[in-house]
Amino acid sequence: MSDTNGRAPDWGVPKASATEGQRSGHETVTTVHTDPDAINDMVASASREHIGHGSDGSVDGFSSTRTLPLRVELLRQLRRRRTQGLLGFLVVLPFVLWAAFEFGSDSSNRRSGGFVDLATASAPNFVVFVLFAAGSFLLPMIVALFFGDTVASESSWSSLKYLLSMPIPRLRLLRQKAITSGILSLLALALLPAVALVVGMVFYGVGEAVSPTGDAVPFSDSLLAMLFAVLYLAVHLMWVAAVALFLSVSTDAPLGAVGGAVLVSILSQILDQITALGDLRDYLPTHYAFAWSDLISTDIDWTAMTEGAFSAVCYAAVFGLLAARRFARKDITS
Amino acid sequence: MAAGALVAALAAAGVVWLNTGDEPPPVATADQVVDVPGGPGEAPTVRLDTRLYLPESTPAPAVLVAHGFGGSKESVDDDAMELARRGFTVLTWSARGFGRSTGRIGLNSPEHEVADARALVDWLAQRPEVVTDGPGDPRVGVTGGSYGGALSLLLAGTDPRVDTLVPLITYNDLGQALVPNSAQREPVDAGTPAVNAFADDGVFKRSWAGIFFAAGMGGAGLADPAGDAVEEGTEDDDAAEAAAAQAVNGPGPRGGGQQAPTDPCGRFTPAVCAAYAQIAQTGQADEATMALLRSVSPATVTGRITQPTMLVQGEQDTLFGLDQADATARQLAGPVKVVWYTGGHDGGRPGPELRAEIGEWFDFHLRGIGSDPGTGFEYAVQGALRAQGSPSVRTVTAPAYPGVGGAAPVQRRPVPLAGPEQVVVNPPGGNPASISSMPGLGSVIGSSSRLAGRLAVDLPGQSARFRSEAMTQQLLIAGASTVRLRVSAVPGTPPPPGGAVLFAKVYDLDANGVRTLPGSAVSAFRVPDLPADGAPVEVTVTLPGIVRPVETDHSVELVVTTTDQAYQMPAQPAAYRVALASADLAVPLVAGVGSSTAPPAGPLIGIAVVVGLVVLIGVVAYVRRRRADRFEPDLADVPLVIEDLSKEYPGGLKAVSDLSFRVESGQVLGLLGPNGAGKTTTLRMLMGLIQPTGGTIRVFGHSVRPGAPVLSRIGSFVEGAGFLPHLTGRQNMELYWAATGRPVEEAHFAEALEIAGLGGAVDRRVRTYSQGMRQRLAIAQAMLGFPDLMVLDEPTNGLDPPQIHQMREVLRRYASTGRTVLVSSHLLAEVEQTCDHVVVMHRGRLVAAGTVEDIVAGGGEATFRVDDPQAAAEALRGVGGVDGVTVDGDLVHADLDGMPRSRALKVLVDAGVAVEQAGPRRRLEDAFLQLVGEEPQR
């Protein structure tokens, strides 16, 4: 055993490994060297310790079911500037929208009964508006970012091969990464309406949620409706997640995977605009993207949401399985 | 995988299936002129221009479709076609006085137009294409809009053979429609939502009446809405714009074949013409006119209608408002379903969804198909706040029309109004006048931008306002509010002889003070016998029937004006005091019931099936992976055995072929080969990163596959470092180890980081590292946990000579702890100085394998550099046991066969040959250089 005792070892590096006088944080490549004593330490320590191994060949203390714990993967992702920046952006966005409404148009020119009034009628309406504004591009992009980047960025950093040769079984790696991306996506998905709700409550007051069809939902019910809206969006966006994950295991370029998934989403939305396609549009993955707006109603019609969930689950299953299959058989050459 | 393909195939099949068989069934039409008796005061026979629509299969129940005022059988062609496609035999005709039919317009006179319709029912009874209930009794329903709707009611009330009817946007009492009076001194029985006082002696609705009269002259068909009304689920703007365009241009020529009128009465009967002239000239209807209007009104027969009736009325209708349908619903003797939709004479005809609902009504009541549409009440609510492109209409469904057929009376919420008594003035000639609606043009304005509600203008001095507090929650007005007002003449300005004429309307006032007049609707009322001395008269005013959500922060404003553009006003100037007699506006509310709350089962089952399939596939994959482990106990102590390993890439490139070698415990083995020899591919296969196409790799007896647990005994550095650039070196190491899930104390971070020797740089982000620093950190990472086998691919690339030297030392010392090191390199010197064993590869094949000693010293062969090679060769050949002597320039090679090189040297010296250099023959280097020399081919 090593000379550390207990589970809280001292991470400190012996300063002896850096030569005297050059420790002030300005080390350059030339100062990097291994002290002969370090080798002796290593050899002494390695000679003392020989860890046994189990019947499946794994070294004692290793179990593939304990590899890449979610906590570790979350930590790996949360420390990324990209993740922090995105979450920060979602916090700022409702304020930006509020400012746009506040300063964007002078009140004399304000078209009453229109878009602005609908969005600023109450806190729930502001949340609905924010979700609407984000629904077609931002939300799919966030999900595509978390899922598309997750494996492809490891490929691009060359760290994927080290994760796999720990070894983390491939499907476990994919699963843990998908769950982590899912948690982050859900966090982002909940953060946006939550901040919007707070902004709305401060600036527009607690009031009824009013739908474009003139339906008014009491504030307490509208909170529940928003919760369900987030849940529906989470289910609906599973299709983007699965497509992004599939692209993520198919390419070493994180941007390619993210952009590809966003492109698919945009393409689907464009096709959805073509009314000539008729019922065929029901099969487009984005067709039910706004089905959650049915929740802002005193008499909730679950039909579109159920169909949307089914559509999303089908797409997610197909692309998720394809992603798993490809990743399980892929040659890792990055 | 198979399941994925299955899902895709199912989806594709579904697409194909859903898109087949959508052709509408064919409909045959036959135009025919039917002669009917002319009736009293008319020609003996009138020729009706009819068209019969025959569905795919006959006989079928029949539906009569009557057209609106100013239209003809052509204007209901679309509706008739739709019903015929549903499977009904449909009969349309131009009413007398319209289109190609002869005769004169009697405004649905019982002896004329209604008798015509009865004659057509007779005619239908003879047709073989029509199902009959008995001899001379066809199974027949009747529908029609406006004028045609009134005919439906009049026919059903006088002909029991009619089985069901759907009158649309029509009147109950034509007198009240054209000369309304919405106030009376007594309280109004307000059990139904859109009740109107319907008092006598009303105010002439001159603009609509004029449009009506012009339509009878063959003029514009503005009396007959053209575009579709906005419906639930319709995305606003396109639908509304289409409707507006259609309304402006009209649906094509109507009433074709009419001559320009030469008679001032046009095609009206003299009685109708005289009545119009009387009322238009005086502004007040006399007894005879009112008697005529009443005689042609459905109100005369509604008490006899026992057939199931679906009453459809428009919310945008200043001609026949919701109050007209309300009155009919109260009077009907049979079951009634009431539908209020967003259109009307100002808003458009029923849209596709409502037309389908009408079709379903006939399906059930004439053919027994489908579910019972019941006797409920539906009203469409158009939102006050609108997001672009989103549907703005929803439907509220109530179990019954309140106050009708035993249903509870409508709930009325008192909304307190406030405002002092105000004086309003009627200007001389009633001009300028307030504006509430644009009759006939309402659908153009109303549907395109909903400006209609904003168009309303109330002139100062002519209007009294009473306002409510701002709403604290939404108030959904569904019908006609009532209010009690106190009106008195201002002493000194006597009221006109006919009494005070006033107009009341309800505005929706938003927080910014922008007012909207829902439905553009206004209630005209007359207070007759207003005392000239200023004594007040209290009246109950029934306001227009509207559907309007008044949002939170909005308030309701009651406005009473003396003038309105659309009505005839007294010419005499007057002034009145108007005050609230009771503070409350009684607002009708109709609560809806949930229509469909349960999610559909199909998609839910689908979700369950898909999730089940995924779980199943997951379980199968897991079980397969469990089975894959194979263990060779004999090799449990051998770090690495590779047998017949091959890797062929698609396209035929063979990176590794038939490679076999073995690494024993404690060795430092060098995998030597030029770039592209397949070293890295081999190491990647060893780490389970690349799938071999053939052969096996066993590590400590366990076969290697992706994720094999035995890989946990290997520490690796393969082709470049892999770190998260946004983390420091130390964080990278910590997270790497944390990801293995192994106990933290087994990692030995301190020792590994000492080996890396990065000093303070270990706490800098990795993206700032040089190539060499990353390399050293990566090797330290491979060393974490002191693995039993350490695999390093080109570990000295990018390091400077002192670092390379240290690295050799590290590897040798590491192996000395009983562990095994596998190093690949393309440099012979590297391998020679670091390793004790070597495997030479070239082009994916094994070239040589053995100890470095064996291979370098090659079985006692020696090389001598001499001044006289020939003499040296001679001398060596002369020694017993020495063979294989060759000359190569100034070098002489010989197999000494166990004889020490010192003895051979002595032989040479004795032979007089000057020896410059003597050593083992470097066959490995020769071979290796030769291999490298062949490189240009790649």
Image (cartoon, rainbow, N blue to C red):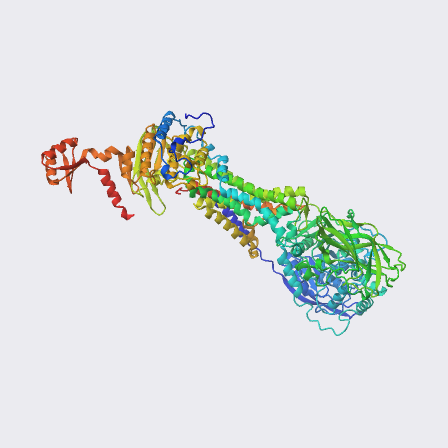
Horizontal side of B396 relative to A140 (left or right) equals right
- The answer to which image quadrant residue B561 occupies is bottom right
Which residue reaches farthest right? B533
Q: Which residue is nearer to you in this view: B507 or B50?
A: B507
Which residue reaches farthest bottom? B262
Question: Residue B358 at what x, y percent from top left?
Answer: 68, 55
Question: Residue A10 at what x, y percent from top left?
Answer: 45, 29
Horizontal side of B726 relative to B48 (left or right) equals left
How many numbered marks does the figure carry?
0
Question: Residue A21 at what x, y percent from top left?
Answer: 39, 34
- The answer to which image quadrant residue B44 occupies is bottom right
Q: Which residue is nearer to you in this view: B342 or B711?
A: B711
Horizontal side of B388 relative to B878 (left or right) equals right
Instruction: Say if residue B305 shows up in the picture.
Output: no
Q: Which residue is nearer to you in this view: B294 or B318?
A: B318
Question: Residue B428 at what x, y percent from top left?
Answer: 82, 66
Horizontal side of B549 relative to B880 (left or right) equals right
Instruction: Say if residue B867 shows up in the picture.
Output: yes
